[in-house]
Image: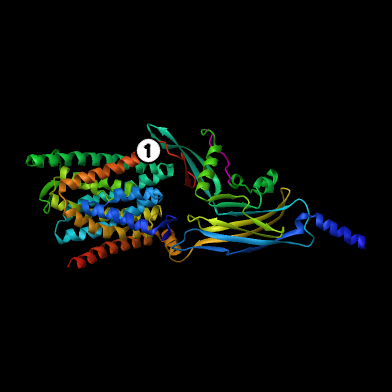
Amino acid sequence: MHKFLAACLFWLASLPAAAEEIVLGLSSDTVSINTNFDGSEILIFGAVKRDAPIPADPPLEVIVTVAGPSEEKTVWRKEKRYGIWINTDAVEIDSAPSFYAVSTSAPLSVALSATEDLRHRISIPLAIRSVGAPDSVENASTFTEALIRIKTKANQYQLNEGTVSLDEETLFRTSVALPAALTEGEYLTRILLTRAGAVVAEYETSIYVRKVGLERWLFVLSREQSLLYGLMSLAIAIAAGWGASAVFNLLRR
Amino acid sequence: MQIYLPIAEVSVNAFLLFGLGGIVGILSGMFGVGGGFLMTPLLFFIGIPPSVAVATGATQIVASSFSGVLAHFKRKTVDLRMGGVLLAGGLVGATLGVMIFNYLESLGQVDLLVKLFYVIFLGIIGGLMFVESLNAIRNLKKGKKPPRKKHSPIHGLPLKMRFRVSGLYISVIPPVIIGLFVGILTAIMGVGGGFIMVPAMIYLLGMPTKVVVGTSLFQIIFVTGFTTMLHATTNFTVDIVLALLLLIGGVIGAQVGARIGVKMKAEQLRVLLALLVLIVCGKLALELLLQPSEVYSIATGGH
């Protein structure tokens, strides 16, 4: 009987997926865009729950990804024609996240093997889906690289290696900085635990980014009642123009 | 103080926008122009998407023109009949302009279109104005009187109409064409078009200078208002928060500018305005001519 139990325990311990589980906390699961929104920071923290002692080797690594809603994009390249720089070639990107951040507890190449990266689509280039460029365009891959380069510059794509802190292989935390230019929607957040480059546990949750108050009201009105919105804009503009001249006439007297 | 603009979806400093509005307002008050030709490129420079800058520029001009035209109504320097004829052309032009704008946006060439229009028109108008006002200053020094207006071929066209306030009896064809042309510019460049309308009214139609500014402002309100509606309902690019911030600075600046303008001589003002137009033109021309630091750009959606 004892032998059987021991065998069971051994079997459980050697089955990684069931052995370690993620318990997650978020500083907030909604990000509100209000009038004075200037970027935000979300704190992602959690613990690793396990019913066996911590495996000695290989070390545990944590990867956290936050992905904004995906959208279709077109990347244009300028060339000099007739003496001026104009857009000539375009490549359509079928789906690119509006925001994408990868935070890791170790360099990504250490924390994740290439095959696991392909399977779980973790690294930035793999988060972008592009079916293919037209034959007329040379070096189509440079367009995807350019997309990543521009988005990285704007802080909309981030690779934050070593920013996840991990204590005793149990408690982990990281913070992800969201830039001011943020798109509304559901931000898929994934936490992956890896050992020797292989994913041993995965957890998914969502953070919702939405405009609130006046921002939300104006945005919705401009899309759904665009005629009303336009008329309102004109009324405000005319009232402001009239008000200004009235005020200055009073001041002059 | 950062403000998040709901339509442009960017966060900008509110005081920067007040300041921009104020500076453009002072200039427009000094020179009697709407200032849209300065405002829209300045919005490009601070990172507002061009389509939002153009549409919101039109909204802001409605406010500043309305403020200006009230003063002209009081002085009875608005030719309503001429304004109506120009407006008829303007509304057709604005519709055409928004159609061209939307078509080129689908081709990914809208930035180029807007910048090219700016470079060409600012270059021509600035150059002509500069030469003309330098000549005027020279003539003034020699004590010569400006040459009398000649009869132009415009007076031979049919469909004549009497414009009592302007003291003209001319065909409606030239004003309709001028209105149409300026309407196209309003939709594509986000400008009121005063900087083209005013010289055209003086030199092509032969209208007396005192009614020109009021009449041009009168029709600009309607054409820019109509353009605002077209952009708001087809492109959803009118950002009312941005417009409001700009026009608060703008209307105050315009009143200050008008005081400064009174103290300066007309010829000197025209030389300064010409130089300003040429500087904006040169800055935009360089952007087209020099290799950009990033030759790739991202557009939303497929094409």
Measuring 24% from the left and 66% from the top, which residue is drawn there?
Answer: A247
Residue A226, x across and y down, in percent: 40, 59
Most common secondary structure along the magenta stretch:
loop
Measuring 17% from the left and 42% from the top, which residue is drawn there?
Answer: B133
Residue A158, x across and y down, in percent: 56, 50
Measuring 53% from the left and 47% from the top, which residue is drawn there?
Answer: A152
Residue B168, x across and y down, in percent: 11, 48
Q: Residue furthest top?
A: A82
Which colour assignment does the render follow?
rainbow
From the viewer's side, name the closer residue of B258 and B225.
B258
Q: Is residue A133 magenta?
A: yes
Question: Dot 1 lies on which element?
Answer: helix
Q: Mark 1 belongs to which subunit?
A: B
User: Over which residues does the magenta segment extend?
Assistant: A128-135
Give the labeled residue for mark 1: B288
From the viewer's side, name the closer residue of B170 and A123.
A123
Specify whether A65 is left or right of B236: right
Residue A151, x across and y down, in percent: 51, 47
Specify whether A119 is left or right of B303: right
Q: Is residue B294 visible?
A: yes
From the viewer's side, name the closer residue of B188 and B128.
B128
**Which quarter shows the N terminus of chain B?**
bottom left
* Vertical position of residue B76 compared to residue A140: above or below: below
* Vertical position of residue B263 compared to residue A26: above or below: above
